[in-house]
Every structure is written in C-alpha cells, then in structure tokens.
Image: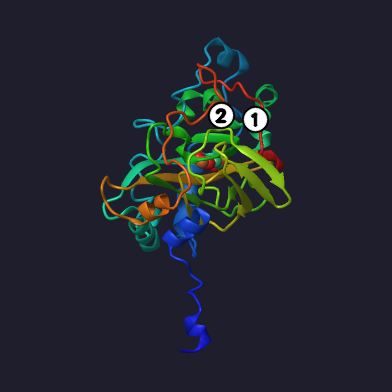
Amino acid sequence: MPAAARRRDPVATPTEDFVERGFHAFAQPLDATAAARLLAKIRATRRFDGSLFLSEAAFDADPQYTGVNPRPGRNLLEGRDDDLAFVERDPAVIATLTELLGEGYETLNRKVVCGVPASAVPAWLKARITDNPVNNLGAYVRPDYRDVTYFYGIDFHQDLIDFKDRDADFVTLYVYLHPVGAHDAPLYLLEESHRPGATLFPHDLVREGAAWRYRDRRGGEALCRQRMLVGEAGFAAVWHACTLHGTQPDAADNERLSLRYLFAKRPGAACGLDTVNAALAGPIRLGATRQDLDDKGAARIKANSVNKA
Ligand SMILES: O=C(O)CCC(=O)C(=O)O
Ligand SMILES: [Fe+2]
C-alpha cells in the first residue's frame, strides 16, 4: 500500500475531534446569504446601543438578576424556523449532530447571542461590571429586549454551568452571522479542556505561554492550547458541555450577533457522545456548577481569566 494511503485521514470525524480536542469546527461555513438575511431581520428589531438599557435608577429600584434570558414566549427566534433552516437543515449540521447525539436528537435551546460593544454600555454599568466573571447583561436590559442574550464578556466556562444535576448529554452549536475577527469578541476555546470532565466555575486556570494550565481541583491537570474562533459569516462550531470557552468584552464599535443552540441526545440512544464521555477522566455531572453568585444571583466574585487571553 502506498504511504499516502496508509496515512490517517487528515479530516477527523466529529467524534474523533470531540475525543481529542473537545470541539469540532465545520470545514465549510453554513449558507452565508441566509445568515446575512437573518442578521438583517435581527438588526431591524432594535438598535444595539445604549437604548437597550434601563436607567441606573430604574435598575436599582428593583434589581432582577434571574429570569432575564430568552424563554418560551420571549425569544427572538420563536416562529423563525424558515429563517433558521440554513442551520437546522444543513446536511453537515444534521450529519454531525446525528453522529454525536444519535437519531432523534433534541433541541434544548436556541437563541440569539449579542456581544455588546463597549460603546453601547452606559458608564454607570461599566463601572459596576468590569472584571465580573459573567457579564450577562440581561439584568440591565429593558424587559422587552430580553428576547436575546447580551454579553459583555464571559469568563472561561463549561456550558454545563446552567445545568446542575444534569449529565453532559448535550452539545453547543455556535454560528456567526457575520465575519468575526480578533476585534469582534470572538470566542476563545481551550482545546482538550473537556478531558477532566465537569468542574466548578470559576475554574482554576493559569496562563502558561500560549496555553493555560487547568487544574480540576481533584488532583488532575491539563495544559490547554487556546484557540481563537474567528471566521466568516456562517462559521459554525460545536463543542462539548465540559469544554472551556469564553469571550472578552467587545472592543469593536459594532455588536457581534451569533446563534447559540443546545442539542441533547435522546435518552438511551447510543452515539458518539457516549464514546467521548467514556474517555473523560472525571464526572459528567455536578450537583453545583458555580460559586460566583450570591443568593439573589448577583456576582460576588471579581476575577476573570479570559480578559488576559
Ligand atoms: O457569545 C458569547 O459572548 C459567549 C456565549 C457563550 O459562551 C454562551 O452563551 O454560553
Ligand atoms: Fe458558553
């Protein structure tokens, strides 16, 4: 057999990518024209500027930190199946999700995520939130606009963070709706950070050159290469619920708009994710996933790693 034929196929399957690195980036962007069409419709619903926010007095009169994300009845993507077909019916997306999650996988959640540009965040708010680990701005956004999730950066986290007492039986699919470069609040993802399994947020991360030393607080550690996810409109990537990723505050003048999906395996269905999870060194479920919030849901820790990425 010629050497070239013996060499391992350089295109890894999604399952192989998950086992080895904790994520899979699609080789080709999804339909960029359809992404632009949806983007225009989203942009037509509001201005992504200071008018998104409550006044400081209105916020302080009745601070609400929970229930401020999109939910059934208040989700900009509701009733937009046609606009989302370029994602949900894309053959490569379906093939990847079917391989990882099995036939009959379930959509747990889908929403628009906005990286809010620095120029849109009122000064009073910036002063309060700088260096908080999770700057989900939903609490400060006018209730009508809470049909989108707004971030001003979020520290390295596992998407399992929102699911205490649930197995990592789901994956995240993230789609950029326009080109995202280094200055558009791209996602930073830590390769191989899924391997120790589920750990408590905020995570124990120390920068080491171009990588991060990640300790699982159970005696295990990994050296994780940092990968900046930049790409064209329609760029898509899928990652494991234990893979660490985060964003810095959006320094550009423009908002970054993306789609974020969670897809779960059907209980019992044998799938690639079972292989991935069986290879993890630690647990795939936690009774508590985070310790950064007080009992009202407000930040009680000021610390942030991804801002040093
Ligand atoms: O889009 C972002 O800035 C971060 C999104 C993210 O990691 C999430 O929604 O879980
Ligand atoms: Fe996330």
Does residue 47 appear in the picture of this structure?
no
In the image, residue 8 above or below residue 16: below
The image shows residue 295 at horizontal and vertical percentages of 50, 16
Q: Check contact, mark 1 vs mark 2: CB within 8 A.
A: yes
Q: Amino acid at mark 2?
A: Leu
Mark 2 crowd level (few <14, some 14–19, many ≥20, 10 Å Cα): many
Residue lying farthest to the right in this orientation: 209
Of helix, strand and loop, which one carries label 2?
Answer: helix
The numbered mark, 1 or 2, whose residue comes first in the sequence reads 1
Q: Which residue is mark 1?
A: 121
- Residue 238 is marked as none
Looking at the rendered structure, the kind of residue marked 1 is Val
Percent x, y of residue 214: 61, 43
Residue at x 39% of width, y 62% of height: 92
Quarter the C terminus occupies: top right
**Which residue does the numbered mark 2 point to in the structure image?**
137
- Residue 139 % position (x, y): 53, 23
Above/below status of 8 relative to 238: below
Q: Residue furthest top?
A: 61
**Which mark is nearer the camera, 1 or 2?**
2
Measured along the vertical axis of the image, is residue 134 above or below residue 112? above
Q: Where on the picture, by quarter, is residue 147?
A: top left
Q: Residue at x 25, y 47 (%)?
A: 268
